[in-house]
Image: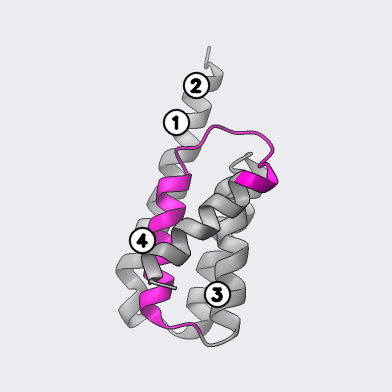
Amino acid sequence: MRVQGDYFQDMHDRITGQIAALAEALPHCALAQIVQGIDDIRCLARDNGFAAVEALASRLESTVATGGQRAAILTYLDAMSDAANVPSGPLSAAMHEAWLASVANRLGD
């Protein structure tokens, strides 16, 4: 019988694996592939309670849509990987702002 911790770990591994794969493929991806990869991660995170990852992926989709630089994409992917360690549950407004501030800090904004 599987316990909830195993499920969380499986989803964590799946999400971080997709993030790592997208980061590795980034130099060779077309914009449409990048957008699809981000959307896949966002949906997986949403469907499995990784609210912090979902919020960052959503913001990254907006960044890419407005012509975001690949360096910014890597920064978001790195933050999303970190956010995958946040326990499941609703993301408070303060937590949401903290993750976005973390990305801004990494980008030097």
Q: Which mark is residue 9?
A: 1
- Residue at the location (69% across, 38% down)? 90
| Category of crowding for the residue at label 4, using alpha-carbon neighbours closer than 10 angstroms: few (below 14), some (14–19), many (at least 20) | few
In this orientation, does residue 22 appear? no
Residue 9, horizontal then vertical, whole percent: 44, 31
Residue 29, horizontal then vertical, whole percent: 39, 80
The answer to whether residue 41 is left or right of residue 51 is left
* Residue hosting label 2: 5
Q: Amino acid at mark 2?
A: Gly
- Residue at the location (49% across, 77% down)? 33
* Residue hosting label 4: 21
Q: Is residue 73 above or below residue 53?
A: below
In this orientation, does residue 102 appear? yes
Q: Is residue 87 above or below residue 43?
A: above
| Category of crowding for the residue at label 3, using alpha-carbon neighbours closer than 10 angstroms: few (below 14), some (14–19), many (at least 20) | some
Q: Amino acid at mark 3?
A: Val
Of callouts 4 and 3, which one flags the residue occurring earlier in the amino acid sequence? 4
Q: Are marks 1 and 2 in contact (CB under 8 Å)?
A: yes
Residue 77, horizontal then vertical, whole percent: 42, 61
Residue 89 painted magenta:
yes
Residue 69, horizontal then vertical, whole percent: 42, 83
Of callouts 2 and 4, which one flags the residue occurring earlier in the amino acid sequence? 2
How far is the residue under mark 2 from the one under mark 4?
Answer: 24 Å
- Residue at the location (44% across, 73% down)? 109
Q: Is residue 74 above or below residue 41?
A: below
Picture quadrant where residue 18 is located: bottom left
Q: Which mark is residue 35?
A: 3
How far is the residue under mark 1 from the one under mark 4?
Answer: 18 Å
Tell me the magenta residue range.
68-94
How far is the residue under mark 4 from the one under mark 3?
Answer: 14 Å
Of callouts 3 and 1, which one flags the residue occurring earlier in the amino acid sequence? 1
Q: Amino acid at mark 4?
A: Ala
